[in-house]
Amino acid sequence: MNLMDTFCETVEKQPNHPAIIGPGNEDFTSYAQLQEKIEFVADRLTTNGIGPNSCVGLHHPSGLEYIILTYAIWRCGACVVPIPVELVPEEKHRIGREICLDTIISKSGMYSVIEGFQNGKPMPIVEDIIVVPVKSFREHPPNFFSINPAFLRFTSGTTGASKGIVLSHETVYDRIHAANDGLCIGPEDRITWLLSMAYHFTVSIVSYLSFGATIILCKNHLGATIIQTTASNKGTIIYGSPVHYQFMAQDRSSLMLPDLRLAISTTTSLQAEIAEAFYHRFKISLIEAYGIIEVGLPCISLSNDKCKLGSVGRVLPAYELHMEDVGLGNELRAINIRGKGFLDAYYEPWQTREEIMPNGWFVTNDLGRLDDEGYLYISGRSKDVINVGGMKFFPQEVEKVLESHPAVKEACVFPHHHKRLGDVPHAEVVFAKNNKNPPTVNELKDYCRQCLTGYKIPEDIRFVDALIRTASGKLIRSESTINKRRDATRED
């Protein structure tokens, strides 16, 4: 199968239905118009040698053109490899070195991404978009194309050990249907889109266009713009990060969102104060989703019960949960998942689904707990646990205390190797703006002692302008990666 064929089936049912609205006030693309644009670009790509068994790097900002290019690559029978524009050059070049690419599609003004890889003359596709043949530094694993790959994406790489996730057309098809058991997206829905398409496409954009919904694009991501754009276009769903909802909650206008039925928060954990502020402003509960690139969207919190704040919801019908005791005491268990739409393979080193999950269960490396009603709460990554002489705790617990200080905007706590104790906690802290009396390191430690036992108190605290995150917005808690990124910034 091919996901482009699924899209064409939707076009046949509703050719004049809006597929994309925005970002300009007059911008409107129907399903039939979107199909026409995709077919035109696909013809240009075919002329430039892209076809079955091609692997194409896509380096382009989110938007209508990104959608057109992705589906055009699929129409050619090729596999899409997102190269997020948010990455630093070395991270982009690493994708080129570790994946066998035939060509890279990029905006001509972002041409530097292919430096050192170019193997031919760049050819224009449409306007300022070019396709460039590139030299490959490796070969594909022997069985790569036999699984009908649609999508090959690196993980976020919070530890510097990213792996290529290979998803077939069949797998993406299975996971969008599994997610829609909970989301119930259809032609009546209009979704305000706020995230990077390089990171969020296979359970979201593909789902919306497969089930006939309309995607709303904003001019910018200011709170007032998101609210106005959603309200004027009768948006029924917003798919964004906690930062977007914080911007919206800070808006002081009286404009409401009467058509909104779901406000989904993803990319990172949702802070209670943001959820409360958003509810106070719009009288709508934010819901969290548990998304894993290897799995899809196994859990969505669809409850409006404010007592369930912090939960990622119940497991969807297509999935099963197994909570494994890992010796941490209390209620915390390792989260294992089984169901539809799981990854087909890891690219390097090559591992098939059967090799990754010999018993059918995917080990997420996340830890959490289930309440009496089956709602799942994520506590953190098992690899994030800090072990001080056998005493284990999560960095999020300490971060929450640090961030409760009125002078602190955000904090990151991570393990620092200690010869005798194994680990000790260290922290980086960003002060709130307009803070006239920043606390000292010792004052912050004293503040933590009011709420935390001694071994949880950060041994060292650094004050920084911004925390180190992955391009998809996830906090990095690896000291070596943090230091490496800061050293690179200083050199720049």
Image (cartoon, rainbow, N blue to C red):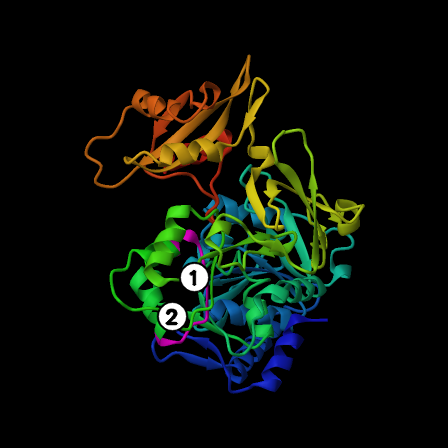
Can residue 451 be seen from the camera position used here? yes
How packed mark 1 is, by other alpha carbons closer than 10 Å (few <14, some 14-19, many 20 or more), is some
For mark 2, give the secondary structure.
Answer: helix
Q: Position of residue 486 (x, y in %)?
A: 40, 34
230 in relation to 309, above or below: below
Residue 185, position in %: x, y? 56, 71
116 or 219: nearer the eye? 219
The residue depicted at 35 percent of the width and 80 percent of the height is 26
Type of amino acid at the residue the image marks with label 1: Leu
| Residue 407, horizontal then vertical, whole percent | 28, 35
Q: Amino acid at mark 2?
A: Thr
Q: Residue furthest top?
A: 420
Residue 238 among magenta residues: yes
Which quadrant of the view contains residue 430? top left
Left or right: residue 327 versus residue 430 is right
Q: Neighbour class for label 2 at 10 Å: few (<14), some, many (≥20)? A: many
Which contiguous range is marked in magenta? 232-244
Q: CA distance from mark 1 to mark 2?
A: 11 Å
Q: Residue at x 48, y 20 (%)?
A: 455
The mark lying in front, picked from 1 and 2, is 2
Q: Quadrant of the N terminus?
A: bottom right
| Callout 1 secondary element | loop
Residue sitting at 75 percent across and 60 percent down? 147
- State the residue position of label 2: 230
Viewer-side residue, 4 vs 58: 4
Residue 222 seen: no
Q: On the rendered structure, is 337 left or right of 213?
A: right
**Circle 1 is placed at which residue position?**
194
Q: Quadrant of residue 157?
A: top right
